[in-house]
Amino acid sequence: MMEDRDAELIARIGELKGKRKAVILAHNYQLGEVQDIADFVGDSLELSQKAAKTDGNVIVFCGVHFMAETASILCPDKVVLLPDMGAGCLMANMITAERLRDKKKEHSQAVVVCYVNSTAEVKAESDICCTSANAVQVVESLDAREILFVPDQYLGHYVSSKTGKKMILWPGFCPTHVRIRPEMIKRLKQEYPQAKVVVHPECIPETIALADEVLSTGGMCRYARRDEVHEMMVGTEVGIIHRLRKENPVKRFIPISEQAICPHMKLITLERVLWSLEEMSPEVKVPEEIRPRAKAAVDRMLEVSKKP
């Protein structure tokens, strides 16, 4: 019965997608069933680039609110739908544009690097954006004596350790990634001694110190395809396991923490995607008084990402 229901939902989504000239983008943390209906599955950088290039009239963004905002920033002429407006980001809520403006007054010479896990208003107050995939590259590209990195202190700490640049770190963090603890890796290593340990740079430094590789979700997917990788411990939100197993069926993927679940990412379901296409709602639209400044910061990031 469940399979029949899903098949009917998928068929109706496909029909409406064609009628609306829509493209469905899904983040790697989405439910497996949502990933499976998407035209493209990726990490924040990949989805940003895909949104900028899509020729559809409608973007259905299966992710969280700041990602849909980024699509709206890059594609103001398109309708951007977020199937559940409750799909937010706790890290993004740890900083506001007003608080960032106050911090900038304290450090008037600082270049502000803004992790994309933030609102459009915060991006508009920043000099350049970054993702977990290109944060090191972005910071290395800056000729600045002082860098203010917002809002993820742990990604900032990792970038500082890789670049040697001292940075002022905003005290934000991802509640999902801080659940991935070093003791969990040590325990799993006893059971899977040959497994590669791959973690996300939003993890705490003690966890990162035990990793063989520190990668974005897109980087994890590419790493998993390597011939020498047979078993892999995965230190990020567990939704990515679906894609990893789907693309590498003969390999073993072990989540470091089964509790590394982002509840906001799981709000989007097939039913919500269908409803969104039917009603053409909820729409995410970044106000024009904010969009150009936010776009400038995102564009600078995309330009750096194009460089070898």
Image (cartoon, helix red, strand yellow):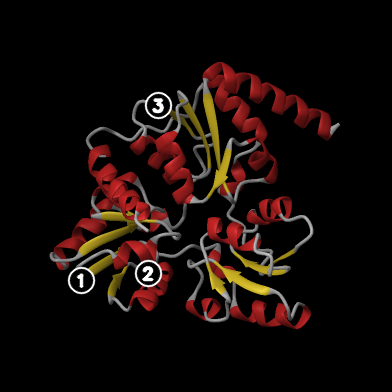
Badge 2 amino acid: Gly
Count residues near mark 1 (Cα–Cα under 10 Å), then give few for <14, some for 14-19, many for 20+. some
Q: Position of residue 6 (x, y in %)?
A: 76, 31
- Residue that carries the numbered disc 1 in the rendered image: 146
The earlier-in-sequence mark between 2 and 3 is: 3
Query: Which residue is located at x 40 percent, y 64 percent?
Result: 152
- Residue that carries the numbered disc 3 in the rendered image: 78
Q: Are marks 2 and 1 in contact (CB under 8 Å)?
A: no
Image quadrant in which the N terminus is located = top right
Badge 3 amino acid: Lys
Query: Which residue is located at x 44 percent, y 50 percent?
Result: 45
Count residues near mark 2 (Cα–Cα under 10 Å), then give few for <14, some for 14-19, many for 20+. many
Q: Position of residue 247 (x, y in %)?
A: 70, 51
- Label 2 vs label 1: CA separation? 13 Å
Look at the numbered disc 3 and give the secondary structure of its residue: loop
Left or right: 27 with respect to 249? left
- Label 2 vs label 3: CA separation? 33 Å
Count residues near mark 3 (Cα–Cα under 10 Å), then give few for <14, some for 14-19, many for 20+. some
- Residue that carries the numbered disc 2 in the rendered image: 156
